[in-house]
Image: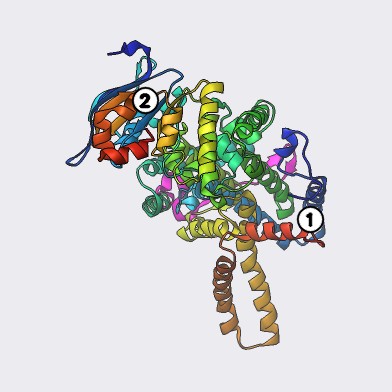
Amino acid sequence: MENSQEYQLQVKDIHLSFGGLMALNGVTTGVRKGEIFSIIGPNGAGKTCLLNCINRFYHPEKGQVIFEDRDISEMKPHKIASLGIARTFQNVELFAHMTVLDNIKLGAHVHLKSGFLSGGIYYGKSRTEEILLRKEIEEKIIDLLEIEHIRKQVVHALPYGLQKRVELARALAMKPRVLLLDEPATGMNLEETEDMARFILDINEEWETTIILIEHDMGVVMDISDRICVLDFGQKIAEGKPQEIRLNENVIKAYLGEEDITYSRLGA
Amino acid sequence: MRCGDFKETYIKDEEIFQSLFVKFCLGLFFIFLIIFPFVTSAYLVYVANMIGFSIIAAVGLNLLTGFTGQISLGHAAFVGVGAYTSAILVTRLGFSFWLSIPFAGLIAAFAGMIIGIPSLRVKGLYLCIATLAAQFIFEFVFIHWESMTKGITGINIPAPSIGSLQFVTEKEFYWITLFFVVLGVGYARNLVRSRMGRAFVAIRDRDLSAEIIGINLFRYKLSAFAISSFYAGVAGALWVTFLKVVTPDHFPFMLSIQYLAMIIVGGLGSTLGSIFGAIFITLAPELLNYLSEVVKAYAPGHEEIFVPMKEVVFGLLIVLFLIFEPRGLAEIWNRIKNFFRLWPFSY
């Protein structure tokens, strides 16, 4: 076993059930700083549940979530955001009636200081703060994700692929230390998928953000992950480097069933 | 984007009034507002005052319902709380009118926060009913807490003054109203483009992801209730000081509905919309009054038809507006603006 000290974010023995259904059954894993860590598994394996437990949307019956040596198992979701854990959702959860810019600005909520008085007066400090925020978003995030052309458009009218990108931009505005991405490339064509993979690598390298990724596109997962964790029916069945996972017996059996299908799907 | 309209700094791009032309028009409008009481009749200035109070209250309600998405059926109650606070402070404790205004706002905000507590647990229609309860509780209190509110006889309020300057007539009070309207609208417009206002809209659009980006839902929902009720309180204090009397009859349930109608007709989630809505809902009955007078002159002996007709027409107008532009007068305004943006060469 690796030394648990080196993990930036760690889940220990998470149990979660809905009625009689065990969604997570004693999952223990951890992510090191600066890693791209993928969680894969068949539908209903509990991947999103695991992210929801980290975010505290779900309250696991048992187990701990430890972030940078702090137990965050009892914190409120908005507190967790202020620690620097950002996430995107499987189904885009943007603020549909706001512009792209406003959506991204909202991501920086925890880093801003203006309250109801200074915000309403909008002069001096709070104005400077807004302008600096705008500058930072434009020059760092919008530029990185290549969404200049849509920044003033209202989100709900945008195509799905761009919405996913805006959601990533919003998560980036939180200046996250750990970024949880729930199926960022779902429903995208090949080109968009490649763009997304490139963005994830860029973020990981330039921002030194730890990334936890749930994805069904095996090409993406195998290419960009440092380590992979495989879930099946709420249990971890394997964890390791992409090459190890590719050849792991349990994964082949449990995750993809027949051996020959596996080879074609995993691209081994 | 307007042709040839390029911004070179972020400051320029974040401005509310984007072009020199808009600022010029705004300047003209302000000059009009200042000249207005000198050139019109006392009655029209009275109507302008009523519009002003409605604007303040409607802007407040729009912050809560339009921006934060928490429907409130008890807005008139908070207007009442502010009105009674000011009246009691001025008549019993000898506060000056000016000092009583912030207190009226604060007490109303406090009442709003208490009524807002259920908003963490209940949403939509259920919250609607919870705020409806507020309306009836406060109405009851206004009527029956006689030692404080003097019940249905009401409280007479002296006219405000600065030094020897008295604000008794409609025209004199107009300046007070104008001052608070400009202040209130400006504050709201700035609030919704800064951190807090964005958080409000985030809660309305998707509270799940609002929480994930670090917005404390409870705190912000209560803040929305507080700020909205603050506006209501200030509007109430101004209104009853203008009328020089406050009775429980001033704050019926109908008034809450009217405020809701203002922001729906004007445009939910738009500060400009609240202004349009307040003007429309206040002005339309007055116009219809006038029209029915005219019609009466031409068709004598049919008063019994035309006088009640104006209620029907008023209702019909609201319905027609909602059918043809569900996003309110503010959206119609935007469309007109966009049309002229490229006019006359729209391609």
**Which quadrant of the view contains residue B166?**
top right
Task: Find residue B30 and report its horizontal and vertical position in percent.
Answer: 78, 49
Give the magenta range: B141-167
Q: Position of residue A81 (x, y in %)?
A: 44, 28
Image location (x, y in percent) of residue A228: 36, 27
Residue A161 seen in the figure: yes
Whether residue B94 appears in this view of the structure is: no
Q: Please name the amino acid that badge 1 sits on.
A: Phe
Q: Which amino acid is tagged 2?
A: Gln
Q: Are marks 1 and 2 in contact (CB under 8 Å)?
A: no
Residue identifier under label 1: B36
Please rate how many residues cluster around mark 1, counting C-alpha atoms within 10 Å: few if below 14, some from 14 to 19, many from 20: some
Q: Mark 1 — on which chain does it sit?
A: B
**Chain under disc 2:** A
Q: Does dot 2 land on a helix, a strand or a loop?
A: helix
Q: Please tell me the numbered disc located at residue A243.
A: 2
